[in-house]
Amino acid sequence: MRLSWARAALAAAGIERCVLDVPRHAVEGALGVFPLRRAAAEDDVVSAPLLVERALAELDADGPREGG
C-alpha cells in the first residue's frame, strides 16, 4: 500500500518514476530480503524523495480508514 501511495503522489506531481527489482521481489515473496526500490529521473532526484516522504507521512498520520 505504501508503494502505491508513493507512486500516486509522484504521478500527481508529474514526476516520472520507476520501480526496480520487481522480478526479484516477486520470486522471494514477502521475506523482505530484496525490497523494492524506487528511482526517479535525474531532474527529480531532489524533489522526488521529499515528495514521497511527505506523502507517506500523511498516510501514516491518517491511518487506516473504514470502508477502504
Image (cartoon, rainbow, N blue to C red):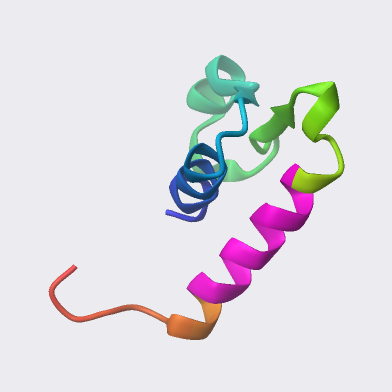
- Please state which of residues 41 and 21 is positioned toward the viewer in this rendering: 41
Residue 61 position, x and y percent, is 53, 84
At horizontal 73% and vertical 44% (from top left) the residue drawn is 48
Q: Quadrant of the C terminus?
A: bottom left
Considering only vertical position in the picture, is 38 above or below 22? below
Q: Is residue 62 magenta?
A: no
The quarter of the picture where residue 13 lies is top right
Q: Residue furthest top?
A: 23
Using residue 68 as the reference point, say whether residue 23 is left or right of it. right
Where is residue 58 drawn, in percent x and y?
54, 74
Residue 25 lies in what quarter of the image? top right
- Kindly identify the residue that appears in the image at 62 percent across and 23 percent down: 18
Q: Which SS type dominates the magenta stretch?
A: helix
Side (left or right) of 52 relative to 11: right
Residue 3 locus on image (x, y percent): 52, 46
Q: Foreground residue, 53 or 42?
A: 42
Q: Nearest the camera: 58 or 44?
A: 44
Read off the magenta span. 48-59
Residue lying at 70% horizontally and 34% vertically, measured from the top left: 37
